[in-house]
Amino acid sequence: MTEPAHQTAPAHQTLPETLGLHMSDSTLMVLAISLFVLTYAMILLEKYVHRTVAALLGACAVMVVGLLTPDQAWGSIDFNTIFLLFGMMNIVNVLSRSGFFDLVARRAMVLTRGEPVRVLWIFSLLTALFSAFLDNVTTVLFMAPVVVTVVTRLGLKPIPYLIAVILASNTGGTATLVGDPPNIIIGSVAGKGFGEFLVNVAPYATIATFVGIAMMHLLMKLRGDLATTGASARLQQILTDNQPIKTDPKLMKQALAIFAVTLVLFMVGHPIGLEAGLIALTTSTFLLLIADLSPVELFEKVEWATLLFFMGLFIVVGALEHVGVFEQVATALTGAIGGDIGLGILLVGFSSAIISGFVDNIPFTISMASVLKELQTTMGARMDPLWWALSLGACLGGNLTLIGASANIVVSDIAAREGHPLGFGQFMRYATPVALLTVVLALGLYYLVFQLTG
C-alpha cells in the first residue's frame, strides 16, 4: 500500500542547504552572534531605523540563512509575554476610555502638591510597590499614562520621570516571585516559593529600589529636571481645578472589576497552572464581551509596534539559544565556579546582569536555570545562593539599556504615542548609572552577607 504523499515528502530544506552550503556548528554559532550584533546595532541607530523594523529584519535574516526554520522561529517566541502585553494593553485602553486615568492624575497632582521631587518619589515608590505584587509590565501600563498626564500639566519634562518609573518597576519587581519573569522561571525550575524570595531577594531589592530612586533624584537635580516651569498662579489653578472630568462610570466599574480579578489571578494562577499571559488574554477578552465597545476601535490603540518588536527580538535571541550560545556561556560559568559558592555568586550575578542588559533575560534565565538545576543534583541545597544571585542579576540588569526588559520597551512606546519619544542613548544617560550602582550594591551586599553568615 502506497503511503500518503505528505509522509514521503522530503524534509524542508533551508536556503543554504538548497544552495549546497552545509555549515558547521561553529559557523552557525558565529553567524547567530553576528546577526544579533547587527540587529542590536540597527536598534542603536534609532535615528535611521525604527527598532521594530530592526528586530523584524533580524528575525527575517535568521530564517533566511537557515539558523531557524519558520516553525522553530515561531516556537522561540514567548507567547506568555505577548499575550500578557496584548491583554493588559486592552484592559488599560478600556480604563483610559472610561476617564479613569484623568481622575487618578488629578488626585495625584493634589497629593504631590505640584512639587517635582514629590512627583518623582511618590510615583517611583508606588511603581516599585505595585511591581512587587503584580508583574512589572502590568504596572507600567497602568502608571505611565498617569505620569505623562501629571508631569505635562505641571510643565515638567516627562522623559526623566518615565525613566524613573521604568527603573522602579524593574527594581521593585525583583523582590518577589511574581514581580518579574526571571523570578517566575527560577521559582518553577528550582521549586522556590513566594516566601523564599521575600527572605532571600526582597531585602536587597528594597535597598536597591531606594538607592536607585535617590540616584535618579541626584541625576535629575544635576540636569535641571526638578525645576518646575509653571508659574505659581498657574500651578494653583491646576491644583484647585474642580471642573468635572468626563467619565463613563459603568465602563470604569467594569474595567476596574476585570482589572482586580486579573490581579488576583496573577497572584494565585501560577501554582495552579495558569500563566500570566493566559490570564490577561482571557480576562481582557471577557471585558470586550461585557463592555459596549467596538473591538476594532479598541485594537487600533494596541501598541502593535511593541508586540512585533518583541516577537522579532525573541526570534533573533532564539537563534542564539538554538545554536547553543547560552548553553556554552552557562557551562563555562559553571566550570569556573567549581565548588566555590562565593565566587559563583559574583560570576552568576554579574554575568547575568550584563547579559540581561543586552538580550532578553527570559531565554538566558531559562538556560542558566537549567545549568544550575544540574549543579543542584550534585551540590544540593548548598548552591541555593546561586539562585538568588541569578534573580538579582537578571532582574536588576534589565535597567542597563532600553531593550533590557519588557517594561522598558512598553514605556518607551507609550511615551512615543504621547509625543515624547524616548531615545536609546537618552535612556542610558539616566538609567545605566542607576543600574550599575544598584547591581553592584545588591550583589555586593548579598555576597557580603553570605561570607559573614556562611
Image: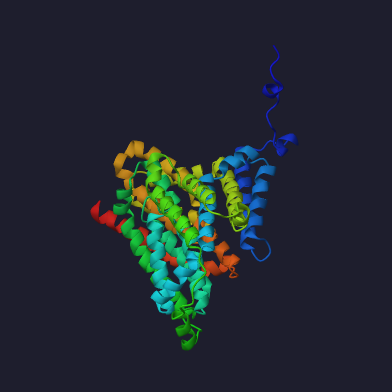
Single out the residue that lies furthest toward the right: 19
Q: Is residue 47 above or below residue 179?
A: below
- The residue sitting at 47% across, 88% down in the picture is 233
- The residue sitting at 43% across, 58% down in the picture is 396
Residue 420's image quarter? bottom right
Q: x, y (%) of residue 129?
A: 37, 61
Residue 371 located left or right of residue 319: left
Examine the rendering and report whether any part of residue 394 can be seen.
no
Residue 337 located left or right of residue 234: left
Residue 415's image quarter? bottom right
Q: x, y (%) of residue 120?
A: 43, 73
Examine the rendering and report whether any part of residue 128 can be seen.
yes
Residue in the foreground of this view, choosing between 381 and 56: 56
Q: Is residue 158 above or below residue 443?
A: below
Residue in the foreground of this view, choosing between 62 and 312: 312
- How many numbered discs sit on the rendered protein? 0
